[in-house]
Image (cartoon, rainbow, N blue to C red):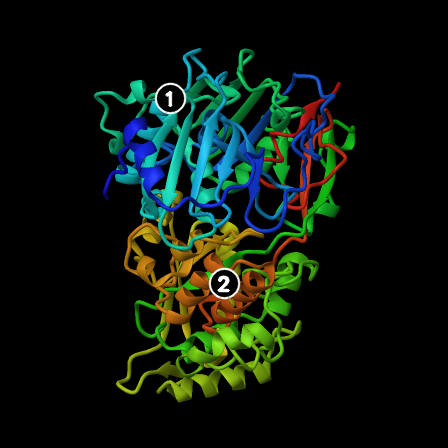
Amino acid sequence: MKLIKTISYAVSALVLIQAPIAAFAEPTHGISMSGSLDLPADFANLPYANPNAEPGGRIVYAENGTFDAFAPFIVAGKTPYGFKVHIYESFLKRSIDESFSLYGLLAEKVDMADDRSSIEFHLNPNAKFSDGTAVTIEDAIWSYNILAEKGTSRYGRYMSGVEKMEQTGDYSLKFTLSGDDRELPLLLGLMPIMKKAEFEGVEFDKGSLTPTTGSGAYIVDDFKMGEFINFKRNPDYWGKDLPINKGQNNLEEIKYVYFTDPSAMFEAFKAGDVNIFVEGDAKRWDSYDFESFNNGDVQKTEISHSRPTGMEGFYFNTRRAPFDDWRVREALITGFNFPFINKTINEGKLPRIESPFSNSYLGMDHGPAQGRVKELLAPFAADLPPGVLEGYSLPEGNETGRDRAGIAHAMKMLEEAGYSIQDGVMKSADGVPLEINVSVKRAEEEKYANLWADGLKPMGVGLNIVNLDASTHTNKLNEYDFDVIYSITRVSLSPGNEQYGYWGTEAADTPETRNWMGAKVPAIDAMIDEMLRAESLENYTAAVKALDRILMAERFVVPIWHNPTWRVLHDTRLKFPSYVPKYGYWPGYAPDSMYWEE
């Protein structure tokens, strides 16, 4: 990966004189992906923060898995959750009450060309690392360069769109951009700024077993590798009085405790070792009976949201036969009788994930493609499976557990794909039984897989469950070493460059991306390209809806259900602000905006 080197201030001035000058608006306090910012330049605090909250208290989370390094920006090692978000900062910070708007954090203001061909960040002169040393433009330049060279692939991908990076003053850094990626200025604003001096003589891409220094509101107080990490609030945090931080970072202590057994996480909450727990069991939510809940020390809070569902369920690896045939995938999806499984697991209380962007205005429509969506898809129609233009919906199933119509449809699909029943077993033309290996890491996932297996038996299809620990599961995902695997893809109301890593063609053969299904569909790449070029919200929305259609009609995943609200159990002294942001319970909301009240 090439490094983007800074050039001298004098030379940069000469270059700017000679080059065409892009039109700039006035320097501003933030930038948005589309439309205008919700908050004015003189805003006092984020709407979902309580500016009157007093510092104090603690929050203790239960995390599944383990950690073995403090290296959040590279592939090597597994970093504890929270280390990146509590320790490091970037030039800009996201508001989770807007689709994709960023406001100044390390940067006190930002200049962006009207055509987004360049962006200039103006560093706040008061910015300091937690050890009291100043954050400098030199630190920023080094951070961008080292992340491009040795960080995870997304950083290199972002920096590949930078034509030139130059220091334009003691506290300013400008990026000249190539191409027409309208999201890139925002992504650059979110890249972390690290302390250069701390990494001298250190192999950046090897990871560290020692916590590193950032400029964030918290510092590491204590940890035991693989078991827990404890952050404490930095009383000398440089940015505590910034409007973007008012009413944020209230808790004195944030702790993450790790469990290898997911069932132990809820038991730890009941015992008081953990004081916040997100409930994933819809049935259990209405039937708690333990001391701290019964005596009022623990309460339930439901937090709604309007963000996309993302995709959670069983991912097919289309790099392998027979999962490279959409008809086989359709048959296997049909075997997952959702109404029956949902009733068994959740008493039928949770709605199904209908597409990655369902539950939002970006989600696909189920009828025939119309208008701009149809225009975008039409050139690729001949190479796409049925449903993209006509409309696609998941198989219906029924609550009885005996979906005869679904089984008949699945058998027809398998027959078209060259399979037939031989002695009660579904076999290929050369006599090989159709059996799938499904990789899971939690007891709940195994339960879902067992119910799926029951639905496949009448078709003569075998399902073998492969139980993995968290580390092995991650390795299997990273190396695409599985037939079918249970996983989750989170998406936002502002999908952009990360979509290439989720389902873009290049990512399919690049280890450690999130294109677990191995999608290699030119139409997908084209829709992502269109999203990033779109200058109007209408075109942007159409491109996302078109992408959503392709992803579902390709039958890449067996989706499960989603929670339209987050169900949170917590210590009654832990309070949520009364205003709920658009993204609901999301990183940047808890624990950042929670506060302690006796």
Task: State whether residue 360 is above or below residue 423.
Answer: above
Q: Could you say which is closer to the camera, residue 528 or residue 318?
A: 528
Mark 1, residue position: 211
Amino acid type for the residue under numbered disc 2 = Asn
Alpha carbon separation for disc pair 2 and 1: 42 Å
Residue 400 x %, y %: 66, 74
Q: Is residue 290 above or below residue 527?
A: above
Query: Viewed as shown, does residue 332 lie left or right of 504?
Result: right
Cβ atoms under marks 2 and 1 closer than 8 Å:
no
Mark 1: give few (<14), some (14-19) or many (20+) Cα within 10 Å.
Answer: some
Residue depicted at 63% across the width and 68% down the height: 340
Residue 460 at least partly seen: no
Vertically, is 97 above or below 216? below
Where residue 161 appears, as percent x and y from the top left, is 34, 48
Q: To which residue does mark 2 refer?
A: 450
| Sequence-first tag of 2 and 1 | 1
How many other residues sit within 10 Å of disc 2, few (<14), some (14-19) or many (≥20)? some
